[in-house]
Image: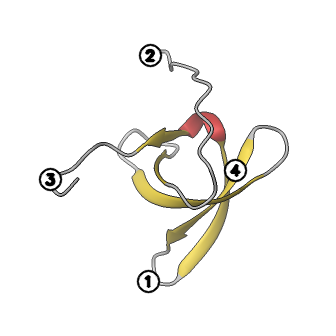
């Protein structure tokens, strides 16, 4: 399975979908900043319900799909 490498660069404050290590793990995250090496700093809700900051590769981020209320 090949991934499409796009030049999508989300600005800070934008909501995005993060595709994790497994195909089933997808999270909605908020982009905080751009880091070095093609990485982004994002914020998500952790297992205990508290916000956590993660550094993820930009290629694993995708724009959120439109939903019912958009």
Question: Mark 2 sits on what residue?
Answer: 1
Between the C-alphas of marks 4 and 3, the distance is: 28 Å
Please give the name of the residue rendered at 53% of the width and 61% of the height, measured from the top-left corner: 30
Closest to the camera, between mark 1 and mark 3, is: 3
- Circle 2 packing at 10 Å, graded few (<14), some (14-19), many (20+), is few
Q: Residue 15, position in %: x, y?
A: 47, 56
First reached walking from the N terminus: tag 4 or tag 3: 4
- Circle 3 packing at 10 Å, graded few (<14), some (14-19), many (20+), is few
> Residue 21 versus residue 40: which sits nearer the camera?
40
Q: Callout 4: helix, strand or loop?
A: strand
Closest to the camera, between mark 2 and mark 4, is: 4
Please give the name of the residue rendered at 38% of the width and 46% of the height, measured from the top-left corner: 64
Question: Mark 1 sits on what residue?
Answer: 49
The residue most toward the front is 70
Closest to the camera, between mark 4 and mark 3, is: 3
First reached walking from the N terminus: tag 1 or tag 4: 4
Say if 17 sits above or below 32 in the image. above
Please give the name of the residue rendered at 56% of the width and 38% of the height, measured from the top-left corner: 60
Between the C-alphas of marks 2 and 1, the distance is: 33 Å
Please give the name of the residue rendered at 59% of the width and 74% of the height, measured from the top-left corner: 52
């Amino acid at each position: 399975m090949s991934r499409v490498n796009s030049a999508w660069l989300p600005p800070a404050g934008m909501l995005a979908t993060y595709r994790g290590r497994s195909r089933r793990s997808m999270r909605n995250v908020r982009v905080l900043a751009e880091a070095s090496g093609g990485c982004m700093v994002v914020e998500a809700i952790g297992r205990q319900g508290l916000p956590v900051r993660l550094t993820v590769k930009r290629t694993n981020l995708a724009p959120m799909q439109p939903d019912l209320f958009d």
